[in-house]
Amino acid sequence: MKASRRSRKRRTRILLVEDHENTLRVLATALRNRGHLVTAVGTMRLALEAIQDGVMDLIVCDIGLPDGDGWQLMEIAQTHHRVAGIAMSGFGSPSDLKRSAAAGFSTHLVKPFDPDELYTAIGSLMPSADGTE
């Protein structure tokens, strides 16, 4: 029964952008284990290439990147197609949250965050997505 219920759900295509290699690897593995299709990259340049190469349902993005920032990335992504976004940052001031919303992010998670916060945010943005237990 569980398998048939999962097969009816569409898998979420997530672009995960994080410059800290270990964090990128752990988050990508965790999201894949929950049934998501994950493209994991560590720079803005690679993220922009991924956006041009295919359609993503969701962008989960660190704000501080070595070659740009997540706010710029989200603004550019929105010009290609409408996509939901979750920002991740060590900064969580009201101005940071406001800037994330203005760039097109629906949620701003402050690092360090509990992985369940990320899963909950994904579930609220992608209610028909696979990855629920």
Image (spheres, rainbow, N blue to C red):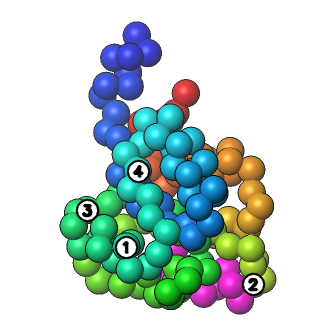
Q: Which mark is residue 67?
A: none
Other residues around mark 3 within 10 Å, as few (<14) / some (14–19) / many (≥20): some
The residue positioned 50% from the left and 86% from the top of the image is: 67
Q: Quarter of the image containing the C terminus? A: top right
Q: Amino acid at mark 4?
A: Val
The residue that mark 2 highlights is 94
Could you give the CA–CA distance between mark 1 and mark 2, rounded to whole angstroms?
A: 29 Å
Secondary structure under tag 4 reads strand
Could you give the CA–CA distance between mark 4 and mark 3, rounded to whole angstroms?
A: 12 Å
Could you give the CA–CA distance between mark 2 and mark 3, rounded to whole angstroms?
A: 31 Å
* Residue occupying the far left of the picture: 53
Which of pointers 4 and 1 lies earlier in the amino acid sequence?
4
The residue that mark 4 highlights is 38
Please tell me whether the stretch drawn in magenta is mainly helix, strand or loop. helix
Could you give the CA–CA distance between mark 3 and mark 1, rounded to whole angstroms?
A: 14 Å
The residue that mark 3 highlights is 55
